Amino acid sequence: MKIATLSSYTDKPLADCTDLELFNALLSLVADATRERGYNQGKKRLYYISAEFLIGKLLSNNLINLGLYDSVRDELAACGRDLSALEEMELEPSLGNGGLGRLAACFLDSCATLGLPADGIGLAYHCGLFRQNFADNRQCESPDYWLRWGQDSWLRRTSRHFRVSFGGFDVTSTLYEIDVTGYEGKSGKLRLFDVDSADERVIHSGISFDKDDVTKNLTLFLYPDDSDDAGRLLRVYQEYFMVSNGAQLILDECQARGSNLHDLADYAAIQINDTHPTMVIPELIRLLGEHGIAFDEAVSIARDVCAYTNHTILAEALETWPKHFIEQVAPQLIPIIDQLDKLVRDSCEDPFVQVIDEHGNVHMANIDIHFSHSVNGVAALHTKILEDVELAPFYKLYPEKFNNKTNGITFRRWCIECNPELAGLITQTIGDDWKHDATRLEDLLAHQDDDGLLDQLSKIKRHNKERFAAWLRAHQGTEVDPDAIFDVQSKRLHEYKRQQLNLLWATNTYLQVKAGKLPERKVCMLFGAKAAPAYTIAKDIIHAIICLGKVVAADPVASQYLQVVMIENYNVTAAERLIPAADVSEQISLASKEASGTSNMKFMLNGALTLGTMDGANVEIAELVGKGNIYTFGEGSDEVIARYQRGDYDPRSYYEGDERLKEAVDFLRGPQMLEVGNAESLERLTEELLGKDWFMTFPDFDSYLTEKARVLNDVADQHSWQRKALVNIAKAGFFSSDRTIEQYNRDIWHLGVDSSRGCE
Ligand code: C3B
């Protein structure tokens, strides 16, 4: 079948269709084209289980991957219709929070593109992560009904149903699927489960809802508020629901492909994305037991099938659940977890590595490490810290399991789609091989002295800044000046990422301007971040940023030199506009704390220069681009880890010792901020910094100021700046998720590539 034109999917001329009718026609066109190309098949299949898949809007991405973008755009244009208007009306599926979820989405894209038989497994959240808006200069949360749009959606209901038993009751579920199109190749699927009894009427005001009625609320939200036991318990219900459905599906499918279950590892690889899906291990063992496989063999099968990725060293993110929670949610897992605990206890006495600790808490990461065959970190430094420090006792037990897989991003979305002008310039300069082999971007290095090219880079950046400014105006009514330097920090709000350090810089800059020291060029600071609803200090930081923005904007002089903007409801769609427009990429986490970071890679690919600490993947970026093409500052991870170990950090000594820091901190709770802000919130933030500053912003303050001054000074010489940007673009090839996925497959999954053509 040859894929027809869009007009063959509508029963009237395109010009007469409503936008909604056109959108639905596009959905059908894409679905047919995807089916026509076929799905990647093979004896062994990867199941990437994850609580988050931050897939972003799919229309343009699918059209590009299917090679239909230009023809559809032209067909619409010929009838006076605009594809970008249809792109605008699509709602973004908000099925993720941050880097972890976006990584999962990039990985599915790469698996599909590389011809690997692979699916994502997760939950069909009705509202996903909350929608953020600002009122009274503070974050407010509301449900994000990404499916309630009067259109069909990418989510396809299947006829497959499962039953999941919880302590005291059962639920039934339905499998939904979203096609994951590969670039000029076949497809994979994102397979999402929903509970049949879900009922959105239990949502009260905002994102609060009846936490007790699990049959109704189970799949309504990603990461329900976990500040109380009911919320925490609900997370365990969600996790078990996800893995029980997933494990049943996997066993069914592998049997259908010919597995006798003893040989499951020849048919399935399961990648456990962070600790949320950990219960898939005991669940698999339990289900294998139901199929008559003895416990010891089932453990060994599960180990051969499962692999675990660690995404953070932050203790609070390495989940532990009270055993009685699991007993309440899935009592059938308790005998298995007890036996796993005993297996570990019998072979090793170290309390650090036990499955169940002396307080009766189950350590999910510990289950993953003992009972999977691979443990990987997500950047070289992160993996080294896992091996040498955070998971050192495990590394001693199982050195052969540990490996590094530095993260990556898909260049389809993060360049070809979001920055078409840059993609066009690259292709014009070096041909289009880079679209399949990102390392070919290095061919750009031969053009470093091409003044015309550097000039074009500069023009494209300017154009992207204008495009972003127009988008922001429409999005939240804020005006930004494309002549200003766009200095961007966009990522989840977390103290370790240190948006507060950037806030202190902005405060200092404002005070400098007030003291008559005027910068050469205006800086527009753009923040994009959501704070977890129960994370008070994170919300205080957002509040302080917004308040400072108001103070600066109200000042006729300062506002000529500085602007501080918090972008509302930062998500993939916003990132796609923002990142191509950035001049400076702020990657300023406390060294040792950011496992990898992936926005650093996206900014680099889009020609922004990194201002960062030697943390996560920044270290690898610095190695690749060389000292002259990145701006680094701050203490290194060894120093930071040693300071934590000594336990002698005293923020007050830094505060007392640096007048600029003292002034900036005092300003946060001073009269001008109090005029626009909330005293309790500003006070709490200031006290947190002075009394604790757990992520050590103060020791890096001085070097941050120095290095940021250098960055802002260097932007003025656009020729030399764009040369640096070109080196960054050229060296970004290493961070293609195609490279990452090839490494996962080579070292962990061992899937065959589906190189056949045509349909399923
Ligand atoms: C993130 C980490 O914080 C990032 O450093 C990393 O790049 C990505 O994962 C992807 O590996 N992360 C997250 O977004 N959510 C978590 N719960 C844990 C880590």
Image (cartoon, rainbow, N blue to C red):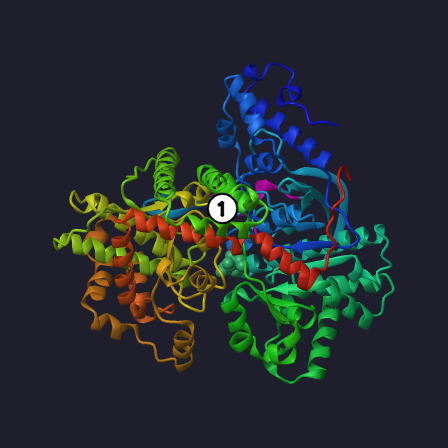
Q: Which residue is pictured at 64% across the width and 49% down the height?
A: 123
Q: Is residue 270 above or below residue 136?
A: below
Residue named by callout 1? 130
Quadrant in which the C terminus appears: top right
Which stretch did the figure color magenta? 198-211
Does the segment drawn in magenta span residue 201?
yes
Q: Is residue 345 shown to the viewer in this render?
A: yes
Quadrant of residue 234 within the rendered picture: bottom right
Of the residues shown, which amino acid type is indicated by label 1? Phe
Q: Quadrant of residue 5?
A: top right
Which is more toward the observer, 546 or 713? 713
Q: Residue at x 69, y 27 (%)?
A: 3
Q: Quadrant of the N terminus?
A: top right
Q: Is residue 49 above or below residue 578?
A: below
Q: Position of residue 648 (x, y in %)?
A: 35, 80
Q: Is residue 221 magenta?
A: no
Tell me where residue 156 appears, x and y as whole percent. Answer: 68, 37
The part of the image, by quadrant, that contains residue 230 is bottom right
Residue at x 83% of width, y 65% of height: 289
Label 1 CB less than 8 angstroms from ligand 1: no
Q: Secondary structure at mark 1?
A: loop
Relative vertical location of residue 245 with respect to residue 202 in this rendering, above or below: below
Q: Is residue 719 left or right of residue 442?
A: left
Q: Nearest the camera: 129 or 98?
A: 98
State the predominant SS element of the stretch in magenta. Answer: loop
Q: Is residue 161 left or right of residue 278?
A: right
Q: Residue at 16% across / 51% down in the picture?
A: 518
Neighbours of disc 1 within 10 Å: few (<14), some (14-19), many (20+): many
Please provide percent x and percent y for residue 694: 38, 69
Q: What residue occupies the far left of the structure in this picture?
A: 516
- Decide which of 565, 123 is in the foreground and name it: 565
In the rendered image of this protein, does residue 462 appear above or below residue 378?
above
